[in-house]
Image (cartoon, rainbow, N blue to C red):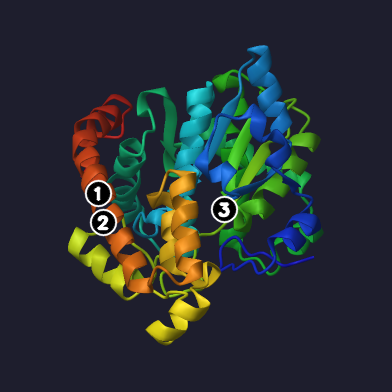
């Protein structure tokens, strides 16, 4: 089975093999039970585990939830949008939303102070989440450090239901900080089912496949814990958006991503420098065409900037046939990116009073 480190750099060469190794099912057979969604149609959201439990609850009119966490260790970029769009989709379906700011994990595993984590959560995540469509007033948002005694006590009680061998088999070498963070994550994932939140209910966790180790062990805890009849959490899985230079998109490498707070000018410069699937010369490109699988600009269009499938397919055909050059593809991306960023950044600033009000009303103080 492929080793996956949820705290390290993960690149997936073969999604099908990874799905088979970890028991992840394709999402395609359930697509007609979901709202029409670009990420699902295009195979960006590709897998699921037990999603039927959530959809069945929705169809019965029973409570169900979506839970996600954010890691405050860097800026919010296009690679983060797939999770936000899924959370928004489930919220619009009627799911209760739980949003965890993983400040304890950032402190324990990423060397980020609690104060810096708090500032990043507000400026880089909450404002962008709301600008991207999350209804914060219908969301249970919390910081791990302020989750409450019952929540943190549960995370310690859960340690009884995971063995050292299971930890090592799932995570490899572990430090005390990682063990503590993992146990806290199990409490986070199961928080929507806590007695104070209405008790057990189907819950889906949208994740990249790098976070699947946490999901798997949380499911083990849920099935073994005696004090509460938890429903094993479901999950959905999305493909990693690659960096602008190819390879992994990394928050530590600004050249690999476009942040949603980048200026239009800086974003366009990153597009100009991005890796393409074009040929070495115009003549060769006209003859052989571009390779979209190797083109990071096309990937940005496919993930987020071109919403119409027919238009994306026209761009693909022109590029692969050689009728469209890499420079022309980049020009399309820059025009779409400018429109996207200007609109999103206006929504960010419009969201600020609502975010500050929410934080104040829920005892978090002012956003600073």
Q: Pinpoint residue 295: horizontal percent, then vertical percent.
A: 47, 70
Residue sitting at 60 percent across and 49 percent down?
Answer: 43
**Label ID, residue 232:** none
Query: Where does label 3 land, which residue?
Result: 181
Q: Are marks 2 and 3 in contact (CB under 8 Å)?
A: no
Q: Tell which circle, 2 or 3, labels the residue nearer the N-terminal end.
A: 3
Left or right: where does residue 227 sit relative to residue 43? right
247 or 196, which is in the foreground?
Answer: 247
Query: Where does label 1 land, which residue?
Result: 339
Q: Secondary structure at mark 2?
A: helix
Q: Residues within 10 Å of mark 1 (few under 14, many from 20)?
A: few
Left or right: where does residue 189 sit relative to residue 303? right
Q: Pinpoint residue 11: horizontal percent, then vertical percent.
A: 59, 68
Q: Pinpoint residue 122: horizontal percent, then vertical percent.
A: 30, 44
Question: What's the distance in space between the residues labelled 3 and 1, CA to CA?
Answer: 39 Å
Q: Nearer the viewer, mark 2 or mark 3?
A: 2
Q: Are marks 3 and 1 in contact (CB under 8 Å)?
A: no
Query: Where does label 2 land, which residue?
Result: 335
Q: Secondary structure at mark 3?
A: helix
Q: How many callouts does the rendering have? A: 3
Q: Secondary structure at mark 1?
A: helix
């Amino acid at each position: 089975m492929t080793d996956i480190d949820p705290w390290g750099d993960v690149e997936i060469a073969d999604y099908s093999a990874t799905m088979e190794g970890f028991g992840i099912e394709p999402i395609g057979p359930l697509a007609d039970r979901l709202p029409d969604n670009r990420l699902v149609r295009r195979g960006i959201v590709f897998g699921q585990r037990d999603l039927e439990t959530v959809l069945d609850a929705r169809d019965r009119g029973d409570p169900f939830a979506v839970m996600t966490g954010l890691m405050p260790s860097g800026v919010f970029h296009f690679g983060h949008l797939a999770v936000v769009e899924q959370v928004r989709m489930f919220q619009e379906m009627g799911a209760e939303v739980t949003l965890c700011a993983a400040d304890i994990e950032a402190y324990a595993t990423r060397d980020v102070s609690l104060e810096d984590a708090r500032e990043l959560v507000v400026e880089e995540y909450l404002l962008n989440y709301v600008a991207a469509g999350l209804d914060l007033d219908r969301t249970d948002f919390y910081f791990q450090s302020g989750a409450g005694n019952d929540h943190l006590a549960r995370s310690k009680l859960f340690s009884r239901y995971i063995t050292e061998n299971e930890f090592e088999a799932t995570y490899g070498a572990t430090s005390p900080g990682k063990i503590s963070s993992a146990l806290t994550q199990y409490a986070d994932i199961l928080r929507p089912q806590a007695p104070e939140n209405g008790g057990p209910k189907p819950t889906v966790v949208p994740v990249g496949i790098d976070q699947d180790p946490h999901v798997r062990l949380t499911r083990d805890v849920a099935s073994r814990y005696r004090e509460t009849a938890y429903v094993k959490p479901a999950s959905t899985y999305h493909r990693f958006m690659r960096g602008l230079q190819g390879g992994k998109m990394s928050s530590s490498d600004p050249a690999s991503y476009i942040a949603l707070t980048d200026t239009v000018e800086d974003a366009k410069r990153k597009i100009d420098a991005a890796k393409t699937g074009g040929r070495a010369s115009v003549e060769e490109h006209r003859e052989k065409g571009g390779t979209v699988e190797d083109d990071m600009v096309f990937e940005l269009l496919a993930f987020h900037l071109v919403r119409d499938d027919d238009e994306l397919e026209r761009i693909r055909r022109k590029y692969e046939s050689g009728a469209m050059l890499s420079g022309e593809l980049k020009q399309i991306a820059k025009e779409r990116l400018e429109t996207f960023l200007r609109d999103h950044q206006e929504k960010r600033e419009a969201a600020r009073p609502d975010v500050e009000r929410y934080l104040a009303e829920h005892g978090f103080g002012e956003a600073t």
